[in-house]
Image (cartoon, grey):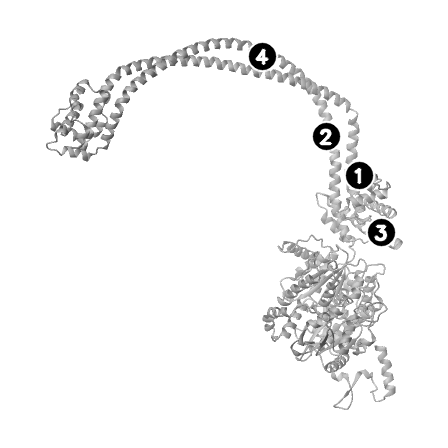
Amino acid sequence: DEKGRVVLDSFLRDIEAQFPPTGMVYDYFVSPSKGDWDHWDTKVSTWRPQRGMEFHQMIVPTVDTVRNAYIVNTLMMRKFAVMLVGSPGTGKTVLAEQQLAALPDSHSSMTLNFSSSTDSGQIQLIIEGTMEKRSKDKLGPVGGSQMVIFIDDFNMPRKVSDESPFQPPLELLRLWIDYGGWYDREKCSWRYILDSQLLVAMAPPSGGREVISPRTQSRFDLLNLVFPADAQVHRIFESILSSRLTDFEAEIKPLGAKIPIATLKLYREVVKVFLPTPAKPQYLFNIRDVAKVIMGVRQANSTNFHTAEEFMRLWVHECMRSISDRFLHDDSEDERRFVEMLSGLLKSDFDATWSGLMGDCDDPDQGPIICSFLQEGTDDLQYEEANDFANLKSLLEDKLEEYNLEPKLIPMDLVLFKDAVRHISRIHRVLKLPRANMMLIGVGGSGRQSLTRLASYIAEYDTFSIEITNTYRSVEFREDLKVLFMKTGGEGKPTTFLFNDTQIKEPSFLEDVANILSAGLVPNLYGKDELPAIYDAVRKDAKKAGIEETAAELWNFFVDRIRKNLHVVLCMSPVGAGLRTRIMMYPPLVNCTTIDWFQTWPAEALEEVAIKFLTDEIVPQMDTKQRVARVFAKIHLDAINMSQRMLDELRRHNYVTPTHYLELVKGYSTVLKEKRAELGSSKDKLANGLAKLEDGREQVETLSVELEEKKVIVAQAQKDCEELLVEIVSERRVADEQRKTVEAEGEKIARDEAECKAIAADAQADLDVALPALESAMAEVDKLEKGDISEVKAYTKPHQLVEKVLAAVMILFGKATDWPTAKKKISESDFLNQVKGYDKDHVPDSKINKIRKYVNDSAFQPSEVLKVSKAAAALCTWVHAIFIYANVAKDVAPKRARLRDAEKTLAQKQEALRNAQAQLKEVQDKLDDLEVRHKASVDQKNALREEAELLEDKLSRAEKLISGLAGEYTRWQASIGAFDVSITALTGDVLVACGFLTYTGPFDTVYREVIVAGWLNAVKDQALPFTDGFKFAGFMARPTDVRQWVIQGLPADNFSTENGVVVTRGQRWPLMID
């Protein structure tokens, strides 16, 4: 170390006086060309940053870096194992990365990070996973290259036991150095590891870092790196910062030299004053914090910072973000002391005062808010100060509203109070810094994850988070990491990896995260078969960037893109020893992150949250809302103070988180609604009872009047029924006489009707003989067509049979029987219609006698005529049918006449019968109507009688009820007044009850009485109504429930009853500690 080098310098000068007199022996080397000592300064080149160079690439050469790089490179080229030792921030990792980056093409490299959970089997698998098989028992780097394996935090693995000096991973590597390999764990056979060498780095033993075994240390060439002299540190950061200020105003440019000096002074003082303790494990500072300040200052743009005062505020802002954001609020008042340090430096180094610089800030003690999202729609990072807090808050609320409208995002109901706005600005600042990560420390419900999601959305980054299940283990976690790396490295999408300490199901999760923080990747994550897909994913973009398309270059491009696009945000809880243990076991959690401690919500924030959740339905007046919100804040802060008092007095921990407060506010709305409904229901029941009593009195009077009226109506109805019954008896006598007459006449008419039917049947029987022949003849006639008749007309001299047929036809038509007359007749156009429509019922006897000789002629037959003419045969059939029908009709005519006379007489009798039946129906309808009216009258009379009896019964019962409840009327009125008072007092009573339900479970009786008394005083101070002598158990518990608890064995004291109410009415699972 520094002191040891001074002693060794003096010792060597005593032995050999040839060393140059100035400086130390460490400052010189033997120059072969000069054959003399030469200062290392001659090897230091002038440095200026290249355009577009990232901050992590800005390595300013110094005497120490040049000397150490030369030594390490010389040893590595000769295949020696090299160990770099030095305090955090001395540049061990940077030196190693420089050496790895400068390796020739014949070499390859791999980076590992040890932690306290690293084991030897895991290391062996990782190293063997990057090798290829050279022969049966030999492994070597891929492609026959020489591999350099860099291991950071070499002394982090735990020892086998407190007594043992050995660390298994280190012993495995020592075995490899000594014997060139190790045993195959599956086959138990020896395996050689070829063409590989180690470069390791570690910090001195402290915290989780162990003292390594001397024999392991003896296998390495050890190089101790010390802090560079202040002049060199100043030179480094001045070179980096001044190169950025070339475009700024003249008054700002001198600050390029002052800021590094002041920052270094601040760092020295912080390291000295703010020491890590078990309660403050995050108080670990190193030179990286100085670099973070300079990197933050370099984000400034000459267009947004015009004066030295603005730039000094920027420097103060970056110092607070890098250092004081991790401070814990306690009695030591670390933030106040840090501000005093800054004030002193401002005065001594910049000739400025804190009040003069911060007077325009929204909160001078908190300093300025500087962020890069005030100007939307610009590609360049516009890092500028937010001078108007109201506008900043409005902008973030708009962003939150946009976030909640995104279809793929889960809406968040956030209240953006001042602390929340500052935290969003801090998170966004880190997300926009290159290779920057963050650790947010706070209790559950403090808003770490929600604010991170919003800040990531504002930065236009995707947010990636794992989903824990019962079967989620290391394999699933690494698969999720592959998806994350492909998204950031393969697709090049800027992404925020949000990781919560509740998601650490296995220690390997945190070890992988530590590797991502320090190296950007998890070692041995990908199998050889997965690498081609990665190369293909980045090949196109790598080609655009001018990268050679070799496997090594594509892999380096993939890793660089991951480190550029991936920002890890860890959400850790300070509760218990978990945070302290993790920081000790995994140094990258502090070394590679910017820490932001989520402090207890201030009263202002608590009030703002309460007002947001108090809806108008619950508390309609804004003034009342504000007073209730002030009591909410008082309840929460009193619970925190009482928990601290209990810790001081009883050494019992109780953690009060914002989740408790949100439960308090939401529970208040729920309980207030419940109690209002409960008391309102009880009051309404009594009010309804009073209303019923009043209605009862009025109804008794009304019923008395109605009863008298009903009695009169019933008497009149009885009289109407009797009169109607007399009329019904008279009408029934008349109806019976008419019915007998109608029935006798109906029997006589039925006999006449039967006789008519017999006559008709006899006539019809005779007709049935002639009709078939006539119908057959008409069918034959129907078959005739004009062509058939034309055939007959065409005869000049017809056949004898045809002539005879037409002569018979002419006789029936009353025409001459000669052929010319017949020919003329059949030539008429409607001849066939005349045949079909011939009046068969009125053929004269003279015609019948004339055609008789034709019909009786044996040759005058249709069958014979058909042989000559079809038409003549049809007419012959028709003549026969007319002859037969006419003879039958002559016999049937008298019968028809007699039938007509009988039917006429029958019709007259039937008409008379119908008239008599109609008269009978009228009488019967009248009788039926009378009977219906009588029945209705009887029913009405009975209904009126029953109604009168019911009214009388109701009147009797109502009089008894009213007289019986006369004493309750006054008591109910008094109870309603008491309920009104209780409902009014609910505003304060429910406040105290919900506070008791949410916070007092861990406290005993003494603490509960003190804290409740304070809450009641706060309610009184805010002029909110409440009940004098308020008791939580009496307010929240039902007497029946308490009695049942006592029966089940619960002690009857007030403390036990309160516990019973807390257990049964609480919104969360109860944890009972006895």
Q: Give the image location of residue 227, x and y in percent.
A: 80, 75
Q: Answer with mark 4 or mark 2, whichever residue precedes in sequence.
A: 2
Residue marked by disc 2: 688
Q: Answer with mark 2 or mark 1, whichever residue precedes in sequence.
A: 2
Structural distance between the alpha carbons of marks 3 and 2: 47 Å
Horizontally, residue 533 falls left or right of residue 249, namely left
Query: Which numbered tag is attached to residue 642?
Result: 3
Residue lying farthest to the right in this orientation: 649
Q: Amino acid at mark 3?
A: Met
Residue lying farthest to the front in this orientation: 858
Label 3: how many residues lie within 10 Å, few (<14), some (14-19) or many (20+)?
A: many
State which mark lies toward you, 1 or 3.
1
Q: Amino acid at mark 2?
A: Asn
- Label 3 near label 4: C-beta < 8 Å? no
State which mark lies toward you, 4 or 1.
1
Residue marked by disc 1: 1041
Label 1: how many residues lie within 10 Å, few (<14), some (14-19) or many (20+)?
A: few
Q: Amino acid at mark 4?
A: Cys
Judge by depth and name the residue closer to the eye, 743 or 382: 743
Residue marked by disc 4: 721
Q: Secondary structure at mark 3?
A: helix
- Label 2 near label 3: C-beta < 8 Å? no
Q: Amino acid at mark 1?
A: Asp
Judge by depth and name the residue closer to the eye, 919 or 233: 919
- Label 3 near label 1: C-beta < 8 Å? no
State which mark lies toward you, 4 or 2.
4
Q: Secondary structure at mark 1?
A: helix
Task: Give the quarter of the image for residue 195.
Answer: bottom right
**Visible residue check, residue 245:** no
